[in-house]
Amino acid sequence: MNLQRMLRGLVGILVLALVPVLPVPPFWITLLNNIGLASLVTIGLVLLTGVGGLTSFGQAAFCGFGAYTTAVLSTSYGISPWLTLPLSLIVGAVIALPLGLITVRLSGHFLPLGTIAWGLALYYLFGKIDLLGRYDGISGIPPIEFAGYRFLSDGSIYYLIWFFVIAVAIGARNLLDSRIGRGIRALRGGGQAAEAFGVNIVRAKLTVFVFAGVVAALSGWLYAHMQRSVNPTPFGLSMGIEYLLMAVVGGSGYVWGAIFGASIVLVLKDLLQRFLPDIIGTTANFEMIVFGCLLVVILQLARDGLWPFVLKFLPKRPPKSVPISVQALARRTLAPAGSPLIKVEKVRKAFGGLVAVNDVSFEVKAGQIVGLIGPNGAGKSTTFNLITGIASLTGGSVSYEGKPLSGDSPRQIARHGIARTFQHAKILPDMSVLENVALGAHLRGSAGVFRSFLRLERGEEATLLAEAAHQLERVGLGSYRDRPAGDLALGQIRILEIARALAADPAVLLLDEPAAGLRLGEKQELAGLLRKLREEGVSVLLVEHDMGFVMGLVDHLVVLDFGTLIAEGQPAEVRKHPAVVTAYLGGVA
Amino acid sequence: MIAAFLIQDGVTSGAIYALLGLALVLVFSVTRVIFIPQGEFVAYGALTLALLDDGRIPPTASLLVCFGAIAFLLDLWGMRQGTDARGFLRSLTLNLILPGVIYGIASVLAPLGLPSFAKALLTILIITPMGYYIYRIAYRPLADASVLVLLIASVGVHLAMMGLGLVFFGAEGLRARPLADANYSVGLLPVPAQSLWIYGATIAIIIALYVFFERTLLGKALRATAVNRLGARLVGVRTQLTGVTAFTLAAAIGAVSGVLIGPITTIYYDTGFLIGLKGFVAAIIGGLASFPVTAIAAIGIGLIESFASFFASSYKEVIVFGLIIPVLVWLSLSHAFHEEE
């Protein structure tokens, strides 16, 4: 972090700290407290919605769990609020975990629908349980005490609330800017590429879901001790919707945008509640019309929210400097050249009645470049997907160093050191080129959520980024390192995918049409790179259409046509094979 | 006896949920919009009918004029780069003249004390075009957005429509007069004529939808759009037209449901949301795709609700909405892990 940014942060904190001391109207402090509480929930939603591509309308219910946990324990059992804090958070996590397990595996829209339903169900439940005081709620909750000081006034709990807001915001940013965070950010792009590099997609989704639940519970805990009483109303569905509105207004991809969005919505709500009744003449809560329209208009006109407009006025962040890593990452020991590595035996894939891959068998030996060619629709990419576990086998088996791979997930297969690129490149356009490549090195790090949140994994992160930068230099994209990957041309994106695969320290590289969209010079460079990898002992299996590229490069060629293997052997032999000639030239030549 | 009564009650509300569930599946499969505001049409329908019963001009008629005016302004904004007279006239007719005429009809007929069937038709006439305007104003600019964005927008539309309901109808609940007052009995069980109307209308709408989708070109276009949007477009289906049709149909079904349910329970400005959500639970059980499963699930929800309100009345809502959890468990176990692109 550079000095100027740190200074700006400190000034911001100082201004925040001075507000209660200044002669401001007391309702400002109340409003700021409410903004802080809402910001906590919204930060969780930003990670869930904006970053992870999941959505919940039920976050208010998690606040409820946090609030009621501490309310019951501190009133009925006299337990100190500081002891109920971890308990509240644990309750939030324990509730979020099974709900998440159920819903994150479903496709996108079932989760939000589910959250609407349980948001309602839990609201009614809070209001029915005797222990929770039914709709009257629980009052007489003790204030938080610290070293004899009681956080009684709005002005004092203000500091506690904003301490947590800033801590959580910084932690959330740390989390996103880490190995785990890259996995989470990859969720929005569909996650297929991330999974091929060993990111556990379900776990990444659960991580953000539980995180959002826990910070909402934290907000609830603070709320209970600020308000000193709880009832079901603030934990209902309409509050849940309001939190989502805050995330959308702020810009659902930005952690600081969460605080911005919460401020806008709550200030607006305050103004509407104060002035709207004078204009319309009644006191019902008409702000929902304004909020509803606001939500639709923002989605129509500024889908990324309003925070990007604020960012325009802030000085741009300098690109992250890549730390020079002290220790190199451990390399995988490669099998001796010539030993059998991948064995594909009679694999078969049928889509209904169509047999896309028909009992194909071949072998990739260590230190070999094997080409897989064939006309369009021959089943080459499907064969790739069968090897990497993206498609499931209808019959036959795939083994790696004698161990069966069949039935393993792409993630488990990636662990063996099988790295791939995709025919339709799957990159994360909003992430920098460097971060895209670092995603490939996911399995070479081990830091978890907590270490990332607290930024204790910087050493490991530095080695991962240094490795990614090294691979970028190696493929010749070093100068694009800090650009968003979406800026690259198609050919460069293919090369980026290769760099990402290399960052995984692969034993076998599976390249799906790597040369498509490359210019001649680039193709030659790519061929040179692949030869160099072969010298290092890495095996390559590649699907390609460009015969000139393939013939001069590969050691062994496998030809598919209509899903069936029609020839294999040395390139020169295969070229003369009658079946191959027929398949490519229609039998005339 | 009690069981029979509960079953009758459950099937009646289940039939309403089925209608809403069908509308939701219809809109989702054609436009990918998860149409949370569906319930608002029910509330608008029921409240409009109740006001017509009192001989008052329903505020939904003026609301319709407002919606039309906004849609017209949006059309004008879209035409700022040049327009042809035909497009302008079409927009004028659709957005200004049509709601104006409906408003005129409503204000002339409302004080006359029409027969209940005519009032029901008038209600449906007022509510149905709202589907088009909601689509034009809120969703058409978002046609390229993801399911998630559309869903969040739906929640916004729901909030706005519920708020407008509060402004126009007030916080008081209203109950409409039944379409027919008669009471029949099957054995010992009394069956109010209104329930028969509900069953009849539900079955008629299901058959009509079936015929529409299976036998008409527009219906087939809708199905094609549901299966493959881009493909449908390439063969010349105007996907915007199918979107309009889906939303208008949904509004019509909502209005019918409102007319049917208005006389059997007191409707508040926010009741529609809860009723609509029960339709949602049914639609989710149907995977947001299957019409028959949705209809059957809706009847099941009606029955569960009716029995729950008898045996554990205070936990009724908890049970009905909690029901979604086992459903999601079942869906997550039975569906292979698949990602949405």
Image: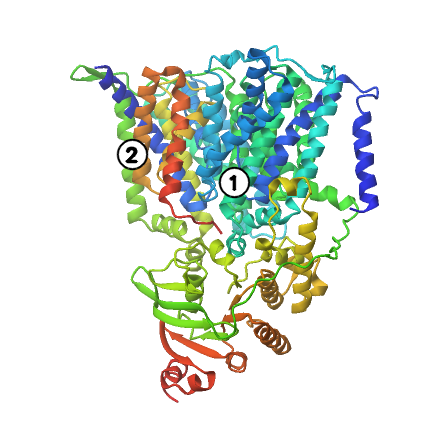
Look at mark 2 in the image and give the residue it sits on: B296
Q: Position of residue A99 (x, y in %)?
A: 47, 34
Whether discs 1 and 2 lie on one chain: the answer is no
Decide if residue A428 is in sight here.
no
Identified by mark 2, the residue type is Ile
> Which chain contains the residue that carries disc 2?
B
Q: Eyeballing the image, is A143 above or below B66?
A: above
Q: Quadrant of residue A534?
A: bottom right
B195 or A343, which lies in front?
A: A343
The residue at the far top in this view is: A140
Q: Position of residue A308 (x, y in %)?
A: 70, 44
Q: CA distance from mark 1 to mark 2?
A: 33 Å
Q: How many marks?
A: 2
For the point 65% across and 43% down, the residue is: A452
Decide if residue A94 is in sight here.
yes
A309 or B322, which lies in front?
A: B322
A241 or B204, which lies in front?
A: A241
Instruction: Indicate which disc residue A206 carries.
Output: 1
Q: Eyeballing the image, is A369 above or below B131?
A: below
For the point 36% across and 83% down, the residue is: A579
> Which chain contains the residue that carries disc 1?
A
SS class, disc 2? helix
Instruction: Indicate which disc residue A70 carries.
Output: none
Identified by mark 1, the residue type is Leu
Q: Describe residue B125's horizontal placement relative to residue A299 as left or right.
A: left
SS class, disc 1? helix
Q: Quadrant of residue A531?
A: bottom right
User: Badge 2, how many Cα within 10 Å: few under 14, some, many 20+?
Assistant: some
Instruction: Say which of marks 1 and 2 sits in front.
Output: 1
Q: Eyeballing the image, is A420 above or below A131?
A: below
Quarter of the image where the N terminus of chain B is located:
top left
User: Badge 1, how many Cα within 10 Å: few under 14, some, many 20+?
Assistant: many
